[in-house]
Image (spheres, rainbow, N blue to C red):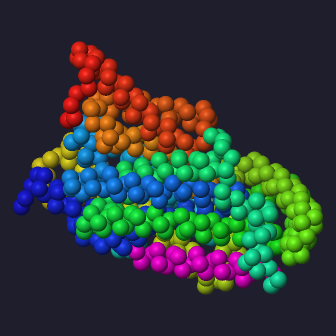
Amino acid sequence: MVSGKAAARRIWTAIFLGNRTMPWYIVLLSIMGTQASAITFLSAPGQAYTDGMRFVQYYFGLPLAMIVICMFFVPIFHRLKVYTAYEYLEQRFDLKTRTLTSFLFLIQRGLSTGISIYAPSIILSSLMGWNIYYTNIFMGGLLIIYTMYGGTKAVSYTQSLQLGIIFAGMFMAGYMVMHLLPQEIGFREALHVSGKMGKLNVIVTDFDVKDRYNIWSGVIGGFFLALSYFGTDQSQVGRYLTARTLTESRMGLLMNGLVKVPMQFLIMLIGALVFVFYLYFRAPISFNEGQVRKVYNSAYAPQMQLLEQEYNELSDRKQAHVHKLADALKTEDEKDIRVAQAELKAVEDASMLVRDSARVLIKKADPTAEANDTNYIFLHFVVHNLPKGLVGLLIAIIFLASWGSIAAALNSLASTTMVDVYQRMINQTATDGEYLRMSKIWTLIWGVFSIAVAQFATGLGSLIEAVNILGSLFYGTILGIFVVAFMMKWVKGNAAFWGALVAELLVITVYMSDIVSFLWLNVIGCLLVMLVAAIWQLFDNAKRGSGDLPEQA
């Protein structure tokens, strides 16, 4: 039996890289499947419902990031035949820089995976009336078993099948939104109404560093975030390292850059159309019906009843005004359009104030409650308005999405822990069987950690925002380390390590101070690592009595 590094490399290739046998289209579907969690299909439509479609600008930097990664990142990873992105950093810098980067990834991905487990738990707890904390344990336990006995190859092929079903299901959901609208309201009319209500704000050109979504933060901040996510996050690097060749890795990434933006646009468009649907038909005062029931079982029931009466009266007025706006749009009378639009917005604003009051009661009745119902909007529409058979299919689709993405995340956490920590620093002489057993144990450990995080995910609001904010706290720093490694050859390991540490502390400080919106943290983190590392290296050179930069290592 072979032991030591040879055994480890063979085990890693089989479990974590699927023996590097994947064709480009499986790589593409696996990359997309890893991104497409339940958060995407639950929270993105709700995000468009509440804030319009401006969130889609976050993806505008992604295609350019794919080109840069294909040019610089992928060739290096393939040439060195690494198993994780962080192996390269020890070769370029030193062990402590590799370990720090691995640690930043593990913390970020572990926390994000916990939020991803919480998303499908919302569905089960809402439909079955289960306690959300027990549901997290149940969902997480099933996912741990699924991941421990699959490996990367099983996860990749499973995701490929899942995505086909997912796209079909979301298409059916979009079709049903239009089918359920009044007969005289077609797709064109629905878009016009949605646009007049500010939900089709796909492009926002105003420059404001505190505004979360505009064309500037989307193209620049989104580019840096995508560059770090696809170029340095092991959950994605592990997908395209499974490809048979360098060309097939590049093909999978480039096609992802072409497909991702229109896919996300269409998912959010469904949310904008659901908003129009609830203009014509009465929406609940809170889409989280379980929390409303808790209020009615508390001392605040009379107050909630009064709020619901007021809200329903406003809903009736809203229906009258939206019909008036639709008629004005058909006649193209600008004056009538402006009047109807102003009237409808005024009633909608009044309805939002009532909903805010209901949120206050929900928190009073249950201080631990999720008062923000963004994650429940699309689920409520599906459950209450679609045919029962289609409801079951869409719920199954969301579960499929969550299982594929969470399994890939757990797999990347286990692979990074095994390759960058266990095999590198704890046990370099284990046998095949020992490495295989430990990889499963680390999958279990990270699964339990993620379940623990899921228990604290209540109250985060829009999950699709929460998971991207969390990533932005770490991605800029991690990207900066790799940019220094690739582009600043004169910078050594000590400078890179301290540059990353200082940059991460400053990024967290900037976020806590609420100076800029979260997408800019990716830019700030990367530039800070480069700046601090360069300054640190110059001081190191000066200490050694040389003002000249050392030659390339």
Q: Is residue 343 above or below residue 91?
A: below
- Main SS class of the magenta portion in the image: helix
Residue 72 horizontal/vertical position (percent) = 32, 51
Residue 498 quadrant: top left
Which residue extends farthest left? 1
Residue 296 shows up from this direction: yes
Q: Residue at x 29, y 32 (%)?
A: 491
Where does the N terminus fall, quadrant-wise?
bottom left
**140 horizontally vs 487: left or right:** right
Residue 299 shows up from this direction: no
Residue 416 horizontal/vertical position (percent) = 30, 51
Q: Is residue 442 magenta?
A: no
Q: Residue at x 41, y 30 (%)?
A: 531
Residue 113 horizontal/vertical position (percent) = 46, 55
Residue 160 quadrant: bottom left
Where does the C terminus fall, quadrant-wise?
top left
Pick the front one: 518 or 491: 491
Q: Is residue 259 above or below residue 488?
A: below
Q: Is residue 166 magenta?
A: yes
Residue 314 quadrant: bottom right
**170 horizontally vs 322: left or right:** left
Pick the front one: 454 or 373: 373
Q: Which residues are magenta?
A: 160-182
Q: Residue at x 86, y 76 (%)?
A: 330
Residue 375 horizontal/vertical position (percent) = 63, 60
Q: Residue at x 60, y 42 (%)?
A: 517
Which residue extends farthest front? 548
Q: Is residue 551 above or below residue 448?
A: above
**493 horizontally vs 186: left or right:** left
